[in-house]
Each structure stands twice: as structure tokens, then as C-alpha cells.
Image (tube, rainbow, N blue to C red):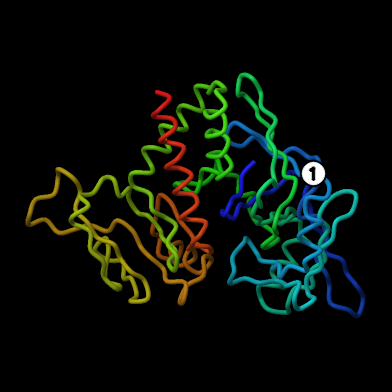
Amino acid sequence: MAEHAVIEHRIFPSAELHVEERGNKPPMITGYAAVFNSLSVPLWGFREKIAPGAFAENLKTDPDVRALFNHDPNLILGRTKSKTLRLWEDDRGLKIENEPPSSPTGQNVLEAIRRGDIDQMSFAFRVPKGGDDWDWSEDGDEDIRTLLKVELFDVSPVTYPAYPETSVGLRAFPYAAMIRLRLRIQQGLPLTPGDRELLEEMAARSRVETRPYANEHAARLRDPDDFDADTFRRTQGGTIYGTKHVPQTISIIWGKLKGSAGPDDPPIPQALRFPTANWTVSEAKEWLADNEITYISFEPAAQDANSIASRQEELRLLLDLARAQG
């Protein structure tokens, strides 16, 4: 059991939401952001479940929790402080009632839930000291992590379940996966071939990954490891690929490929950065789609600088242990 500074996101298969029509009153989003004793989908060598009462201690403190769309802080649907979001535990799980605003985002989310286009919720949380427990399998095929106590940050209707397997980059590895591997190594438990492959991939990505950025969303056009690091430079806007105009509210990261670019060859675009002061995640992705710009990964800006530092420190400790164990 450990104290984790990282904010984690989870969605459980049985979490659900609906629209409650209330006659002359505004409609309300209702459902469960989390369900007790329901195993998650397989993560990186483990599954999770939430113990009854996991939210109780945090809810007693009257936390200022937001309801967001797709965990985007620019797309707010409600807030406990303003009484437009209510949260409580019942026998099944974490129940929510949310009165979304009459904004385009609020109305679009309501209509998508009515149509069944959006039918699941996710939640963002942090695990305090002693807030989780692990049930270890001897062969390491499927360890079980039980969340005993969590601190809530937001609940969110989601378009896609944000399982770690579907995303790209260092943040794609769940923080809990790093914790699991470290604890197995420290306790002398065997690692599976899949665990060792994951360690190798983490080590490889740690050499080039410093994302997410604190105040910028990043669309990676090419892997930075393909570039000579000494050639990177930034411009505000410009033209890429000969014809595609990039406005000055977007930064272009340029560089030269290793081993193939001559001293007189021009740099090529490696990434685009979207400042959070000007762009939401949805707006940035919409601009990329409208301009037919393909990218290999998209990293939303970090919401918590402590999360970045904690992830990097945990990864460093894990890799040091793995090297010591051979």
C-alpha cells in the first residue's frame, strides 16, 4: 500500500448513466460513476475493483468535485460547490445527479445520452496512503487491486472508455501498473513475459517521453526519437507540408531526422502544440481533423504538475529495481 500523488482515471463496465426528464424542471443526468465489487476490464497484468465505502470518507469532507465531459476541464457540466452536481454512496456504488447547463455542451451531452450514443461514466481519483490493497497471483497472470479509499476529483460522461491499452505514450501506462510491477519485484514474486515486455517498453519510452505538458496540448506528428535532438526549434504558426497554414495560436516544433538530413536540408514538423489559453482538447482535435492533419498521438495538457513528477519518480524507481534484479 502506498500514497499516490497521481490522478488516475477509471471506467468500470457496469457504470452507467441516463437522462431523467422532470416535466417543467430542467432534465438531469443520473447514474453511477462507479460500481462496487465489479471487476474492471484487464489492465496491464491486473484488474481492479472498488470496495463499498471507498468514497465515504472523502464525501464527508464535502469535496469540490466537477462533472466534466470527457474529463475536459473546459467542458464543465456541474459542480458540487454550486449544487449542480450531487454525489453519494448507496449499496450499489457512487450515485450521481447532475443538472447540466443550457450551454451547447450541456445540451449536446444530454441529447447524446438520450440517443444512447453516450452511456457510460468515468471518474478521476487519487489514492491516499493505505487506500488500496493488492491480491497477488503466484504466476502474475492476474493480480487484483482493490480500491479501499479514494479522493474524488471529477466524474465524467465519456465518449470512449479511456482504457490504458488504447492510448499512446508514457501516460498510457497506468500509474497502478508501475506500482504493481515494483511491488512484485520488491516481494520477490515472478514477472510474466508480458511484464518484462512492458518494462522494456517503459524503459524505451522513458528516454523520449516528458509529456504531458503543463499548459499545452500536444499533437505528435512523428516520433521525436527519429530526430536529432539538437535540431529542434519552435515557431508560432507557419506553413507545414507545403500548403497547410497553421495559425499563430499554435506552435510548430521543427527538427531534422537522424542520419538522413544534410546541413542545408530544411527541418520538418515533428509536433504541434496548442496552448490551453486558446484551445480546448476538443477544439484542437477538431482543427486537426478539419485540416486533415494526421498525428500518431495526442496528449492533453497536464492538469496536475504533481502527477507528472510522481509518475516520473515511480518509473525511475521501478526501472532501477528491475535493472538491479537483472
Quadrant for the C terminus, please: top left
Quarter where residue 287 is shown: bottom left
Is 188 displayed left or right of 247 in the figure?
Answer: right
**Residue 160, percent from left and from top:** 63, 51
Res 196 seen here: yes
Task: Please tell me which residue is depicted at 56% across the width and 53% down the height of the picture.
Answer: 6
Is 62 displayed left or right of 193 in the figure?
Answer: right
What residue is disc 1 on? 51
Q: Is residue 274 above or below residue 183?
A: below
Q: Is residue 193 above or below residue 234?
A: above
Quarter where residue 273 is shown: bottom left
**Residue 2, percent from left and from top:** 61, 44
Task: Please tell me which residue is depicted at 42% across the width and 71% down the height of the picture.
Answer: 275
**Residue 210, percent from left and from top:** 38, 53
Type of amino acid under label 1 = Ala
SS for dot 1 = loop
**Residue 265, percent from left and from top:** 11, 56
Res 156 seen here: no
Quadrant for the N terminus, please: top right
Q: Is residue 147 above or below residue 159?
A: above
Is 249 displayed left or right of 136 in the figure?
Answer: left
Q: Pick the residue in front: 180 or 279.
A: 180
Is 299 displayed left or right of 111 in the figure?
Answer: left
How many marks can you see?
A: 1
Quarter where residue 190 is shown: top right
Q: Pick the residue in front: 255 or 302.
A: 302
Q: Tag 1: Cα neighbours inside 10 Å, few (<14), some, or many (≥20)? A: some
